Image (cartoon, rainbow, N blue to C red):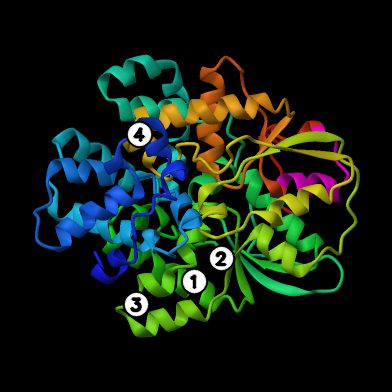
Amino acid sequence: MDPELIKDCVHCGFCLPTCPTYVLWGEEMDSPRGRIHLMGQHAEGTPLTGAMAGHFDACLGCMACVTACPSGVRYDRLIEQTRAVVEREHVRHPDERAVRALVFALFPYRRRLRAMRLPMRLGRRLQPFLERVNPSLGAMAELAPAAVPRAVRLPPLVRARGPRRARVGLLTGCVQGEFFPQVNAATARVLALEGCDVVIPPRQGCCGALSLHSGREAEARRFARRTVAVFGRAGVDAVVVNAAGCGSSMKTYAEVLADEPAWAARARALPVLDLAEFLAELGPAAERRPLPVSVAYHDACHLAHAQGVRAQPRDLLRAVPGLELREVADSAICCGSAGTYNLFQPAAARELGDRKAERVLATGAGVLVSANPGCSMQIAAAVRRAGGGEIRVAHTAEVLDASLRGLDPGVLGRPPKPRRMMR
């Protein structure tokens, strides 16, 4: 915990109404400034207690406080440093250690995650039983998508349609790649139709976001080095990311690898942009065809707050003829997904998910658009709990893909038929 960063907080309270856990509980120690106060105590020599660790664990890391802070407090760096301290110094209950070991042995590894797709779907039927065994197992079963499309075979290179404007790498991700493969396929098609050669390294692996956000520093650095090496060899102008949590972590690789100057330099030489951010900078080239549909856009925290990407996705959606964009009330408050938060803190995550689902349903939109797979699963599960059935959820890339290819809006949020990806 960096004492200099801690001193930047003047305890003004602007962060309080933006903090999801403070909104839920009204507890000062579960607000950003309260947690920073605890960080300061520990930095001054107070031992890390179980109660202190609990307040740090309860933080979603949504970074809404970073957006709200008038003093420029780097809460993002502080909470990552603090989580690493908690992992080193705090002794967790055996049940909690077992769940965390399961999650980090499974989610960053696509082959293992692929093997768990069917068991997780079947587990939805056993969700009440699993909930009684362990709330985290119950949450894992509840979050599993009802229908997961078969994997789409992505070639190592998708060539630009028309004059080439850029050469980009595409991060396929872990959860995105296994539970939402159609999003990666749509992303590659959109980029190609906009004049980009799309390089898709077949052995790229996990970017390390989940590890970084959970204080597993050594593991996060290992994943970061591998990702930098893979895309550095690809000879791309930039890496395009379609999952908010992955993008926010990859943009901090130089800080993550600061103790290894050569790797930090390689990370700085590799631009990382969110899909919406990249397309907004590139500008449109392909024709948008009408897509008569109403969509509610959900701000993923690690896109809106951690990366500051808010206007670009909305501008891209508004540029689609016939599309009606509807705003979700209190959009800056997290849905409760937050990487692994909904697995490790299922009760708080459920409250936030139910709150978000209520506001999404109030829009009356036909499709929910989200730029993060965790958010998509979290909100869909909350809508089911609210009796709203299976909500149609799509990624910004899928909406653009449907418009560029002139598809019926009914395809949005529906599992596509298995097909081979275009070359």
Tell how many labels. 4
Return the disc, 1 or 2, that comes first in the chain's sequence.
2
Q: Which residue is mark 3?
A: 258
Which element carries disc 1, helix, strand or loop? helix
Residue at horizontal 39%, vertical 59%? 76
Return the disc, 2 or 4, that comes first in the chain's sequence.
4
Q: Are marks 1 and 2 in contact (CB under 8 Å)?
A: yes
* 333 relative to 127 in the view: left or right: right
Q: Would you say the magenta stretch is mainly helix, strand or loop?
A: helix
Which labelled disc corresponds to residue 201?
2
Q: Quadrant of the C terminus?
A: bottom right
Task: State which mark lies toward you, 3 or 2.
Answer: 3
To which quarter of the image does residue 51 belong?
top left
Which element carries disc 3, helix, strand or loop? loop
Boundaries of the magenta span: 398-409
How far across and down, in percent of the image, does residue 344 sit?
32, 37
Query: Front-most of 189 and 35?
Result: 35
Decide: few, some or many residues near mark 3? Use Cα within 10 Å; few <14, some 14-19, many ≥20.
some
- Position of residue 392 relative to residue 199, above or below, is above
Which labelled disc corresponds to residue 230?
1
Say if residue 120 shows up in the picture: no
